[in-house]
Amino acid sequence: MFPEVSLRGIDCNGAVKRHCRVNPVMGSGIKAAKEFNLWRERERLIAGIYATITDPAGWMTFLRELVGLSQSRSARLLLLNAGADQVLSSFKLNIDDDYHRRYVQYYVNACPWRPELRRKEPGRLYSTYLHFSCRQPDYYRTEFFNEWAGPQNIHHGLCGTVYQDDERSVQLLIQRTRGQGHYSEAETEFINDFVPHLQQSLVLAGQVAAGRARDEAVALAAGRETLPFVLLNHELRVVYTTPGAEELLGGGWLTSRDGRLRLGDEQADQRLQKVLRSSLQAAASRLFDDDGGTVEIPSADGLGRQLLVRPIHPEVPVVVGEPPAHVAVYFYDPEGGLVIDPERLRRLYALSEAEIRVARALAVTPEPASVARRCHLSLHTVRSHIKSIFLKTGAGSQAALIKLLLAGPARRR
């Protein structure tokens, strides 16, 4: 005897088939074979959902199989902001690129079901024909249908919020043509059986992506500079510290309070927080031209300690969970082993003697006024030399110039 196989399927009349006894050898008739095939398709679809944990591209396979299993026209998985009124990214199947772009830019909020969907309980899908107050004749009179859905022969849908946190919502939308008909209660219930698996896979995928992003950010930060550093996440909290940086954090002049870096000097701390925020924004927006900066740390012992801040953005696709943007904060003592070779500056960038003095002083202190005191020059002359150094080195900003001096070929290692 073969064991009883529990199935959740839909028969030709639209009724849910909860249990049936299937014997692969002795099973009788086409009906049992169809139900067994439906069971296998369901199991394969669930397996595909969990494959997306490590491979976000698997969402396209999931959508394709879901459309086939539910006999639908198209499907989309939308990643939206917390208010669910702005599409951040998406996976789509059988939706024209131009129509999808128009949806993202405008029709996402012109959809007649969306205001009501925001009030519906998340964690399930709803039939647009059965579960919304906008009836089908009214739907056919909307701008959304006449300008967007109608030309694509989209008449019916299932939609719902399958995941939600403080920063984003994930919605699944499945569509049918007029000829394919609306989604019945039985069909809606059948597809809703997949939602818990979708939720769990999204949570796990977020955790996996966060770990991968942190590991790749550490590798990127370490590869850019050999200085000790700490790595901050999208909340500017410390998530990794090199052994050398651990010792510096215990020095009193720099502390980690609740995972956040703080300088003992109030003005220097304000400068640090500003540079950290701008660097995180650069990492999140992928605009690295005007990134980072340096912060000089006043100290009673006269040591010219500085922090070098850089944005880090690992190439890790994220559907939900922590954004991949990170910030690396490097520690260096310009007076303790950092040597900028004047001959290399002259040979590489054709700097004059005065410009070399100013460039080397900038590696010690980023403030032009401090450079002026060190070099016994006027502030006006120092600024003029800095502009000239920008032109000769190709640095677009003082932060970029200091990075060139610290990590470029003119530094002796």
Image (cartoon, helix red, strand yellow):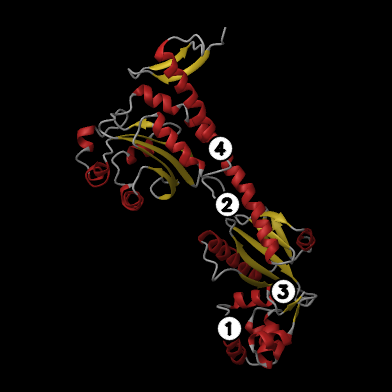
Q: How far is the residue under mark 4 from the one under mark 1?
A: 50 Å
Q: Earlier in the sequence, mark 4 or mark 3?
A: 4
Task: Please name the residue that numbered disc 2 is placed on.
Answer: 316
Q: Which residue is mark 4?
A: 51
228 relative to 317, above or below: below
In the rendered view, would you say 260 is above or below 5? below
Q: Which residue type does callout 2 highlight?
A: Val
Q: Secondary structure at mark 3?
A: loop
Q: Are marks 4 and 3 in contact (CB under 8 Å)?
A: no
- Judged by depth in the image, the label closer to the viewer, 4 or 3, is 4
Label 1 is placed on what type of residue?
Answer: Phe
For marks 2 and 4 on the same chain, the one whose residue lies earlier in the sequence: 4
Sequence-wise, the earlier of marks 2 and 1 is: 2
Q: Nearer the viewer, mark 4 or mark 1?
A: 4
**Residues under labels 2 and 1: Cα distance?**
34 Å
Q: Which quadrant is home to the N terminus? A: top right
Q: Residue 301's quadrant in the figure?
A: bottom right
The residue drawn where x is 25% and y is 33% is 178
